[in-house]
């Protein structure tokens, strides 16, 4: 039973780390990098600026999910963020990208 529990735990950990490891590829494929970079402001804020702004805030992932899906302006200045629907980035990939960003967008 203990070995089975360890194997299940290892499988779960591997499946959870795979999307996080692929998050830079996710944001590249979704073309988020046209406006955002890891460590410098472009059209929009750097991913690490986003992580710092939302650090420790409950509900940050959900708030960012809604902002990416629906777009908006005012949080980072006057330039609006356009909405990004599921044809650009799936819900699962968006959640993985947001988790990666909130963890500091580490390569």
Image (cartoon, helix red, strand yellow):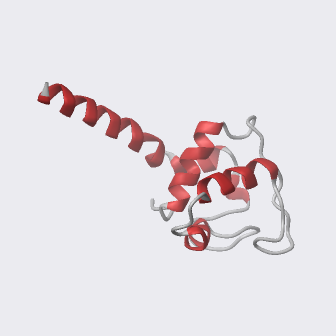
| Residue sitting nearer the eye, 18 or 57 | 57
Q: Residue at x 73, y 51 (%)?
A: 66
* Image point (48%, 61%), residue name: 103
Judge by depth and name the residue closer to the eye, 2 or 16: 2
The answer to whether residue 104 is above or below residue 11 is below
| Residue drawn at (49%, 65%) of the image | 104
Residue 8 locus on image (x, y percent): 26, 29
Residue placed furthest toward the front: 58
Q: If the image is split into quadrants, where does the C terminus sit? A: bottom left
98 above or below 37?
above
> Closer to the camera, 42 or 18?
18
Does residue 3 appear left or right of residue 36 in this picture? Answer: left
Residue 102 x/y as whole percent:
53, 61
Residue 100, above or below 95: below
Asked where in the image residue 11 lies, by quadrant, the reply is: top left
Count of all numbered marks drawn on residues in the image = 0
**Image-based side of 72 in relation to 18, left or right:** right
Residue 95, horizontal then vertical, whole percent:
58, 45
Q: Nearer the viewer, residue 64 or 14?
A: 64
Q: Quadrant of the N terminus?
A: top left
């Amino acid at each position: 039973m203990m070995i089975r529990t360890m194997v299940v735990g290892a499988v779960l950990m591997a499946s959870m780390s795979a999307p996080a490891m692929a998050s830079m590829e996710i944001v590249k494929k979704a073309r988020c990098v046209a406006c955002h970079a890891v460590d410098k402001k472009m059209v929009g804020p750097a991913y690490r600026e986003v992580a710092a702004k939302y650090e420790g805030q409950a509900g940050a992932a959900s708030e960012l999910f809604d902002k990416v899906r629906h777009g908006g302006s005012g949080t980072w200045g006057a330039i609006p963020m356009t909405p990004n629907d599921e044809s650009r980035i799936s819900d699962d990939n968006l959640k993985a990208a947001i988790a990666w960003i909130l963890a500091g967008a580490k390569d």
